[in-house]
Amino acid sequence: MVKVTIDREECISCEACWLLCPEFFEQNPEDEKSQVVEEFRTGGDPAEGDAPEGSEACVREAADECPVTVIFVED
């Protein structure tokens, strides 16, 4: 399992992360920025979550493809 943090303040809503890894990332309907799917959030925070086993590759790809590098993945 890896820990994921999104700097939502700097997110530009480009859609890359939730298109590449929709099981973990989604668009917030209120501000249109990226957030962690509720099921995987840490403490209910939409900017933090634990990626379940099997989704690490797509989470890392989403972080790598983010044009403003606001997704951080820690082992």
Image (cartoon, rainbow, N blue to C red):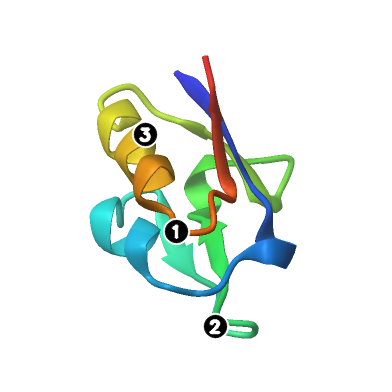
Crowding at label 1, few (<14), some or many (≥20) Cα neighbours within 10 Å?
some
**Circle number at residue 60:** 3
- Give the SS element for disc 2: loop
Whether residues under marks 3 and 1 lie with C-beta atoms below 8 angstroms apart, the answer is no
Q: Would residue 55 appear left or right of 70 to someone viewing this image?
A: left
In-front residue for pair 18/12: 12
Q: How many discs appear? A: 3
Which residue is rendered at x = 30% and y = 32% of the image? 55
Q: From what the image shows, is residue 43 above or below residue 69?
A: above
Of the residues tagged 3 and 1, which is closer to the observer?
1
**Circle number at residue 48:** none
Task: Please name the residue that numbered disc 2 is placed on.
Answer: 29
Under mark 1, the amino acid is Pro
For marks 3 and 1, give the CA distance.
13 Å
Of the residues tagged 3 and 2, which is closer to the observer?
3
Q: Find residue 26 and report its horizontal and vertical position in percent.
A: 43, 64
Q: Find residue 13 and report its horizontal and vertical position in percent.
A: 50, 74
Q: From what the image shows, is residue 1 above or below residue 60?
A: above
- Give the SS element for disc 1: loop
Of the residues tagged 2 and 1, which is closer to the observer?
1
Which residue is rendered at x = 59% and y = 50% of the image? 70
